[in-house]
Image: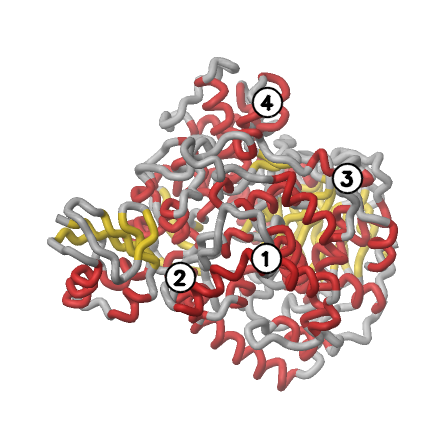
Amino acid sequence: MITVKLYGLLRLDSGIKERRLEAAAMKDVIQDLTAQGISPKDINGCVILVNGKPANKRSKLQDGDVVQLLSPVAGG
Amino acid sequence: MESKYAGYMGKVMLVDLTAETATEYPWNDEQRELYLGGKIMAARILCDHLTGKETAFSEENWMVISTGPLTGTGAPSSARFNISALSPQTGILASSNCGGSFGFHLKKAGYDALILKGKCNGRKWLEIHDDAFIFHDAGDLWGTKVGQCQEMLIRLIGKKKFGKLCIGPAGENLVKYAGIISDERAAGRTGLGAVLGWKGLKAITVSGSKTVPIYDKEKTTAWCKKWFAYLQSHPLTGKQLPRVGTAGLVSSMQMHGLLSTKNYSAGQYEDFEKVSGETLAEEYNIRNSGCLTCPIRCARTVSVKGQEVKGPELETLGLLGGNICNNDLQKILDWNYELDELGMDTISTANTIAWAMEANEKGLWDNGLEFGKTDNLSQVFEDIAHRRGIGDELAEGSKRLSQKYGGKEFAMHAKGLELAAYEPRRAVGQGLGYAVSNRGGCHLNGGYLVIMEGLGLNADSQTPKAKADLTMLFQDLMETISASGQCLFTSYAFFPGFLLTKPNGIITKTVNAAVPHVGWAVRFINKCPRVAALHLPVFHHTKMIRLATGMYMDFGKYISIGERGYTMERYINCKFGVSAANDKLPKRLTDVPQDPNNPKTKIPLETMKKTYYAARGWDQNGIPTEKTLRRLKIK
C-alpha cells in the first residue's frame, strides 16, 4: 500500500489531502489522481518526494512508500 | 525642496518633538536620484546625523518615517512605508517596512518623509493635516492596546479615512522588540515601537488633500494594468500567495528540512500538518485580504473569539508552532492577535520564548517555560508587554538573556535580532544572509536566497558556490524595491512562471544545476551594473519608476541604487563598531550538522563571508573601503 499526500494548491483545488492505493510506480499514482479529476498538468507542476527524497514521475515505488506532491511556493 | 520628478511630494519634514515644531529638511533631486526614497533615503539622513556615539534611547536618535516615489501612484503593492532609527534591540541601524495606509496618507498631506527628533514633554500624540502639525496630550490613549487606540483615534479625528500608526503597551514599556502598528499591518521588527515609546509619542495620524503627481499618467495606467495582470497570472503572486498566503510555505519548508523546530535544533516538525498553511486555509481562513493597491492579497482573515482579525504569517506559524513544539493552530491565531494588540514582534517574541524553554530544559534558568506547554503563554506575553515578573527579563530578548544566563550557542539571533522561521542549515545561502544582514537576523534583508535553495527553485542548498554573489544581487534588488515604496513580494515574479510550474522540466533542472556555477556572471553584473542598461521583461519595476516619476531608470541603475543603500547602511553600522566579527550565527548553525550523518548540513559561513565582502568592495574585516564609499557616492 502506498500513501500519497497532497500539499499546496494541488490539495486545496482538489479537496484531496491523502490517497492510499496499490501502486508499483509513480505513473500509477498519477493515473489514480487523474481519475480523481486532477489535471496531469497540475501534477507535473509539483515537486515529487518519495519517503522524503526527491523523485520524479518515472520513479518506481515499493509497498509502504509515502509519496508527497507539493506545488511551488515562496514568500516569507 | 520641490522636485522636478513626479511621484514625490517634494517635502521632508523635521519634527522636533521637544519644541513641538515642524520645519522643512533639505532634500534635493540629486539626492532623490541617488537614494530614491524609503529605507535608502532614511539611511542617508541618518548617516549624515549619527556619529556612532548615540544610543537608541536618547534624544539624538532620530526616527525617519519615509515613503517611496511609487507610494500612492497606483503601482502594484505600493502602499509601503519605512521606519528607520537606531534599534534598542541591536544598537545599530534599524529599519522596518509596513503595509499600513500611513504612507499613502502622508503623501496626500504633502510629505515624502518625517524625521522625528528629540523627546516629547510628557506623553503625546501627533495629528498632521496638510500643513498643520498639532501635538495633543496622550491622555487615555496611553496604556491602550493598538486596536482600542486606533478606534479612539478614529473618534478623535472624526473620520475613517486617514493614516495612523501607534504603539501598544510593549512600546510604552520599552520592550526591546516592540513594533509599530498601522491599521492591521506592523512595522514589527527591530524594536522601533520602543523608540517611539521612549520618545513619549503614542501615535501619529495624518491626512491631506493633495494628490501624488504622475509623470505620464496614460502610460503609467497602462503599465500598471499590464503589471497587475502579470502578477495575477504568476504561479506565486497570482495563485499561491492569494490562496494560502505566506503560510503556504510551512509544508514546503518541512519537506526541505527548513522548518525551525524546537529552537532550531531540527528542520522538520512531526506535527507540521496541524499548523500548516493548508490547514489554515481549509479550517480557519475566512477570506484573503491585502494592502492598498495590492493585487497579490496575501493576508489572511481569521476568527479569534468571534472577531474577524488578521491571521498569522509563515514566520508566526513556524516560530509559535514547531519551534516551541506547539501543534494547536487556534492558539497560534489567538497569540498572533494578542501580540499585535500588545504591539510586539511575533518573531522575536517567539524566538525569545523558545530560547527560554531550552534554557529551562538545560537547567540554566528556572522560568516555568517548557516546550509543548502552552497554557501559560498568553499570560507570559502580557507580562512581557507590561514588564511584569519573568516578562521583564524576557522583554530584553534572547541575546541579552543568554549573556546573563548562558546558552549563547542556542540563542538564535544575529547581531541581536532573532532569526526568522527558516532553519538555514539546509539553505546555506540563507544562512549567509542572516549573518550579514544590516538589521540583524532577517530573512528578507539577508537576500532571501532560500527561494533558490528549495522554495521556488531547487538549486544545491548545501554548496557555498555562487551564494555570496547571489546574496548581494538579491539584497540590492530588494533594497531598491523597498526604497521605491513597493512590496518585496513583487520580486517573486522575477522568476518566470514556467521555472516554478515545471520543477521536473529540463529547463528548470538545467537552471537548478547551473546556479552554483553562475557566481562569476552575477559578480560581473554586480561590479558593472551599467552593462544591464535595460528593462527586463520579468522585472516591471524599472519602467514603472520611469513612467511614474520621469526619472531615468534601467535595471543596472536600479541595482546600483540598492548597492549604495546597502553599503551605506553597513557604513552606519560600522560607525557603531560593526565588523566581520559581528556577522556571525549561533554555533548551533555553524558547528552542529542538522543531520548527524551529513557533515555538509551546517553553514560554511566564513568561506562565504570572504567572497561576500570581496563582492561588495568591503575589506576582509567587513568594512567598506574608502574606494567603495567614493565609488558609490556615499562619501
Mark 3 or 2: the one toward you = 3
| Residue B159 in view in this figure | no
Read off the residue under disc 3. B621
| Cβ atoms under marks 1 and 3 closer than 8 Å | no
Q: CA distance from mark 3 to mark 2?
A: 41 Å
In the rendered image, the quadrant that contains the N terminus of chain B is: bottom right
Residue B22 in percent (x, y) is at: 82, 53
Mark toward the start of the polypeptide (1 vs 2) = 1
Residue B502 in view here: yes
State whether discs 1 and 2 lie on one chain.
yes
Amino acid type for the residue under numbered disc 4: Ser
Q: Which residue is mark 1?
A: B158
Q: Nearer the viewer, residue B160 or A16?
A: A16
Residue farthest bottom in this picture: B218
Question: Which of B249 and B159 lies nearest the eye of the viewer?
Answer: B249
The quarter holding residue B130 reads bottom right
Image location (x, y in percent) of residue B311: 42, 49
Residue that badge 2 annotates: B240
Q: Which residue is mark 4?
A: B402
Q: Earlier in the sequence, mark 4 or mark 3?
A: 4
Q: In the rendered structure, which disc, 1 or 3, sits on the residue that comes first in sequence? A: 1
